[in-house]
Image (cartoon, coloured by chain):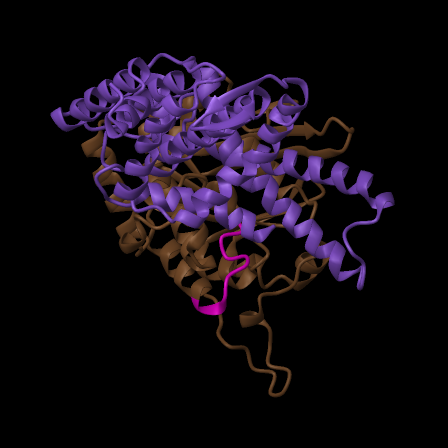
Chain colours: A purple, B brown
Amino acid sequence: MNDALHNIRIWDDLARRQNAVNNLHPLVKLLTTIFYLIVVVSFGRYEISSLLPLIFYPVVIFSLAELPLGEVLKRIAWAMPFVIGIGIFNPVFDHQTVELLGFTISRGWLTFISILIKCVLTVAAGILLVATTGMERLGAALRMIRVPRVFVLQLLLTYRYISVLGNELARMLRAYSLRAPGQKGIKREAWGSLTGSLLLRSFDRAQRVYAAMCLRGFAGEYNSGAMAKIGAGDLGFLAGWSTFFIMARLYDWPLWLGSLLTGVF
Amino acid sequence: MSHHKVEVSNLHFSYPDGHQAIRGMSFTIFHGESVGVIGANGAGKSTLLMLLMGILFPDSGEILVGDTRLTKKTLPMIRQRLGMVFQDPDDQLFMTTVGDDVAFGPRNYQLDEAEVESRVIEALTQVGIPHLKDRAPFKLSGGEKRAAAIATVLSMRPDILIMDEPTSFLDPQSRRRVMGLLKSFEHTKIITSHDLDMVLETCRRVIVIKDGLVAADGPAGEILKNQPLLDGCGLEMPLSLQSCPNCGASKYEVE
């Protein structure tokens, strides 16, 4: 539990560092990521090879931002069970076969792999955006593209309160385990009262935090300070990557490269 | 300078469950005074602070800050003049860095970024932690957190400082530092605490609360020496005023 809480905060620390990607304007990173997500999901279910060049974006950002590989992979892995849950029945239902790189496989497996790749790419792009921008600056960028205040606020407050809720839970679990020696987990009879009390405690705590915010003039807008203007470098980043995404969408590079290498043109 | 005055008259407040927390409280705190509000648990101290800050609204009676009556309409203006430091600094520090937390108030009042920056530096310097500006609040020690929480309020340049248990959860040296800090402020101060030695050192006047009423109001030296009064209100004389159990001498006398 404490590890999980510590990990939430890792992203804030990572986003605060100074490096080429972190210093980019948050709006530019947000727009690039949105464009990337649209391009990735726009590929058809059987188009696997043309998806592959898009892996460049997360890889390049990842290495420029000097992020810890293990942490990023761990988070991508968390999303996997959901995707596997969604795609696992495709091979069962879709038995038609296709030829891929000289192998014959069923179309069900193809769509399953395509879903997996799309998931890894989109989740990685999202994680990289948060880890290089920070939640507050991301909130400011969302406001710039006219996302309604109430949604942005909800996102920022949820992010803020997750750790409040987590802290309360960690404290309760510690108190429980100290009085329940040798017990694995929590007894089913205690689940109800534990969740109820967690809810009440976190209400209480959230109210105090909210009061502290109101006392310092909070009136619904999360002001995260002035942001630097969008510079030439920022525009170059957006334009460069957008061009790359469009090219990757329009042309099947792996196929073209394969044909070039094998001399079949 | 009447605008730093806080006047509470005939204040009543009951919680939704019917518990009468404040039952006709009246007092006036003048410009530059440092006032300790003391009382046993459940006497109504925290409720009083919440009423003063407009987090709760009284059933009857009124609160005047300067010449302005505290109402929902005047709340933003009044909150700019009253700065409250919470008992638990974790409730007050919610941004990702200490600097952002200290800047939170000034930014909400739409000050320009240069002014915000200078206020952040000024407030952090005042509490002695300018070097912690870029640190994450959760990584600070208890004493540093308390100093940061005080800075978040100072950056709004309030006329009146309200503090709920400013020395709770602190080790002796951090407590001493916070006390030094409190003494250095020239603001009007309202401090609630069970740490009566701290109240004795930092406050000239003491208001004792019992069962939602003002049980006594007077100079700190007199009230905190009044053993029968303190006993009746569930309190105890400050250690520094108690006589030595061996030789019967007192550490020091308050004039």
Image side of residue B161 versus residue B209, left or right:
left
Q: Position of residue B203 (x, y in %)?
A: 46, 54
Q: Residue pushed farthest right?
A: A189
| Position of residue A103 in the picture relative to residue B127 (left or right) | right
Query: Which span of residues is magenta-colored?
Result: B163-173
Quarter of the C terminus of chain B within the rendering:
bottom left
B12 vs B30: above or below: above
Residue drawn at 50 percent across, 66 percent down? B171
Q: Quadrant of residue A181?
A: bottom right
Percent x, y of residue A132: 33, 37
- Where residue A142 appears, as percent x and y from the top left, is 37, 20
Residue B62, visible in the rendered structure: yes
Question: How many numbered tags mark residues here?
Answer: 0
Q: Is residue B39 left or right of residue A191?
A: left
Whether residue B31 is visible: no
Q: Is residue A202 magenta?
A: no
Q: Quadrant of residue B241?
A: bottom right
Q: Nearer the viewer, residue B19 or A150?
A: A150
Quadrant position of residue A183: bottom right
Identify the residue at the far bottom of this view.
B247
